[in-house]
Amino acid sequence: DKLLAGKHKGFRLGKYKLLGQIGKGGMSSVYLAEHEMMRARRAIKVLPRNRVGDSSYLERFRLEARAVAKLDDPNIVRAYDIDNEGDVHYIVMEYVDGQDLHQMVVGQGPLDYDTAADYIAQVANGLQHAHEMGLVHRDIKPANRLVDKHGTVKLLDLGLAKLTEDDQASLTMANEENVLGTADYLAPEQALNSHEADSRSDIYSLGCTLYFLLTGSPPFPEGSISERLLKHQTARPDSIFKTRADAPPSLVEICEIMMSKKP
């Protein structure tokens, strides 16, 4: 109970000693932990107990572990194990000592062009591996991209991923969850039906992420969620040149192609 309430110091989970909380969302909490025998640091993602009784959340949690386990790429956070102690279910993952791209831009402002291009290229490499393994991420956004101390970008958070050869997409269909993802970065076709999203939908979201890295804001920063989703369907975002007049035309063109309305 104390662990799930955020009181983690001195507590253990399986073979791991918990050192602190490093993230929290509606779907899970993430803790920094250390394997007691190996002295290796890991990130442990814990499913909240109040979600355990919901079979769709628990199965999606397991799906995330299966999805990450399929992947082996330097630009994707690795998963090492999934386990539970009673009704505390958790995934043991690679710990990345760094910050996400959203935090980076909010704290430092838009990135220089070479750095932005390098980071997006790294994510694209990881995404290509995921797509080749039959996985569509469906939630590409700056906050899901971690940069470590060496400048390596790691793709994480596969909680909404779709395995193309698996029946697991029915998990969301059964619960009538037709719109999955984050409104600021959601491809037009994914907003209409998330179950039809494919690799091109991830590319659109990656283009929106590049737009954010270059301008400091998502393509459509204003309005309600519904209004922003509609703008992704029908409107063109402000030109990158409006805020970055010296942006390389080739980079701006790549970003615009990635954010094309039609897949």
Image (cartoon, rainbow, N blue to C red):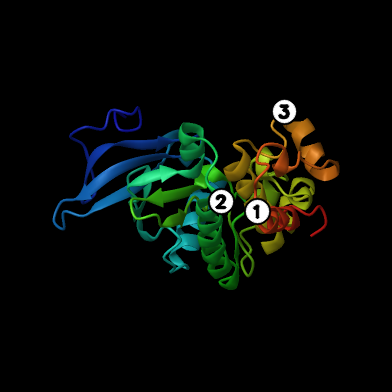
Q: Which mark is residue 128?
A: none
Q: Nearer the viewer, mark 3 or mark 2?
A: 2
The amino acid at mark 1 is Pro
- How far is the residue under mark 1 from the one under mark 3? 26 Å
Where disc 1 sits, the SS reads loop
**Horizontal and vertical percent for residue 171?**
63, 52
The amino acid at mark 3 is Glu
Q: Residue furthest front?
A: 246
Where disc 3 sits, the SS reads loop
Q: Residue furthest left?
A: 37
The amino acid at mark 2 is Tyr
Which circle's residue, 3 or 2, is located before the other in the chain?
Answer: 2
Question: Is the residue under label 2 in contact with that under label 1 (CB below 8 Å)?
Answer: yes
Is residue 217 rendered to the left or right of residue 36?
right
Quadrant position of residue 239: top right
Q: Is residue 259 above or below residue 107?
A: below
- Residue on which the image places disc 3: 222
- Badge 3, how many Cα within 10 Å: few under 14, some, many 20+? few
Q: Residue at x 46, y 32 (%)?
A: 107
- Residue on which the image places disc 2: 113
Res 27 seen here: no
**Horizontal and vertical percent for residue 236?**
81, 42
- Residue on which the image places disc 1: 248
Which circle's residue, 1 or 3, is located before the other in the chain?
Answer: 3
**Horizontal and vertical percent for residue 56?**
57, 47
Is residue 41 rendered to the left or right of residue 233?
left
